[in-house]
Amino acid sequence: MLFLDGVGIGKTDSAINPFFAAHLPVLRSLLQDELPSLHNHTLLGAKASVIPLDANLRVPGLPQSGTGQTALFAGVNGAKIIGKHFGPYPYSSLKPIIEGRNIFRQLRDANRRPYFANAFPQRFFDYIAHRGARITVTTLSCMMSGVRLLDARDLADGKGISADITNDGWPAMGYSGMRPIEPQEAGRRLARFTREYDFVLFEYWKTDHAGHSEQMHEAITVLERFDAMLLGVLEELDTRDTVLLITSDHGNIEDMSTKSHTRNPVPALLYGYSQDEITDRLRFSSPTGGDLTHVTPLLMEYLTDRR
């Protein structure tokens, strides 16, 4: 699962939507040279499929990461429970729900092996040791579920992926010897983790950061880097028993005319094992279509009952 923070389905206008300004040959090759847009949000191709997921969750206001990720990774409409969208970190009263129902916890309880592929620098571990309250849903879920967070040694040993994909930011954090890698190599490494683990998650938060920046060149750069990583994933992924899911928690980067999040649907791209079946299950999860809360329950069904 490749989780792209802050990626919605937007207009085809390349002046505001970097998906239509960036060079994304790998993503386009999966989708028969098309990209999802508000006017064409469902793409059911031979290689891969994209469907829209509702990130608004029947709650007024702009979707936020804390409640959006609670819905995505725990299958619970946290925004409805607390009566508002909230983020970037989870609302305090949602933490017990996240602890009991996050996908890492559910997989471990089912004797499956989940893996969070992001590697963190020492400054992050120092931060949570002293001020541990402000932690994102993904990281908090791992900590609550006994899933070890990867560190710099794991990254250097090829057992993790940097949040920036290429390790470029690590020298500035005190790791002068950290070897930079090409995005394609990072993708191949990520796909190889699926040979050992039942569920592998990589979180790419640079997309949300770029959306808030209102800098089109930054948005294009982070999308093109992701596209290059995706090529490596596709080279190594065994689609005979593995499905790739790319999705998000709320819209943002698809509309660079504003720094704020959007109420646009988010894409769910599926490629590989049982792609068509999973796509249809998500697409028709409710009479009004799929939303973020439907992802984890469906993944759990495929990762437990069907394997």
Image (cartoon, rainbow, N blue to C red):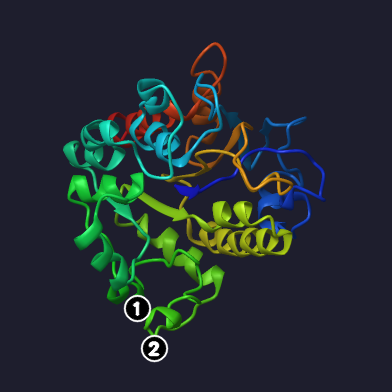
Q: Which residue is mark 1?
A: 156
Badge 2 marks a residue whose secondary structure is loop
| Residue that lies at the very extreme toward the front in this rendered image | 131
In the rendered image of this protein, does residue 194 appear above or below residue 266? below
Residue at the spot 77% in from the left edge and 50% down from the top edge: 20
97 to the left or right of 31 = left
Q: Are marks 2 and 1 in contact (CB under 8 Å)?
A: yes
Report whether 227 appears left or right of 112. right
Mark 1, Cα crowd under 10 Å, few <14 / some 14-19 / many 20+, is: some
230 sits to left or right of 36: left
What is the three-letter code of the residue carrying label 2? Answer: Gly
Numbered tag placed on residue 177 in the rendering: 2
CA–CA distance between discs 2 and 1?
A: 9 Å
* Total numbered badges shown on the rendered structure: 2
Looking at the rendering, in which quadrant would you find the C terminus? top left
The front one of 175 and 155 is: 175
Residue 173 is marked as: none
**Camera-side residue: 77 or 134?**
134
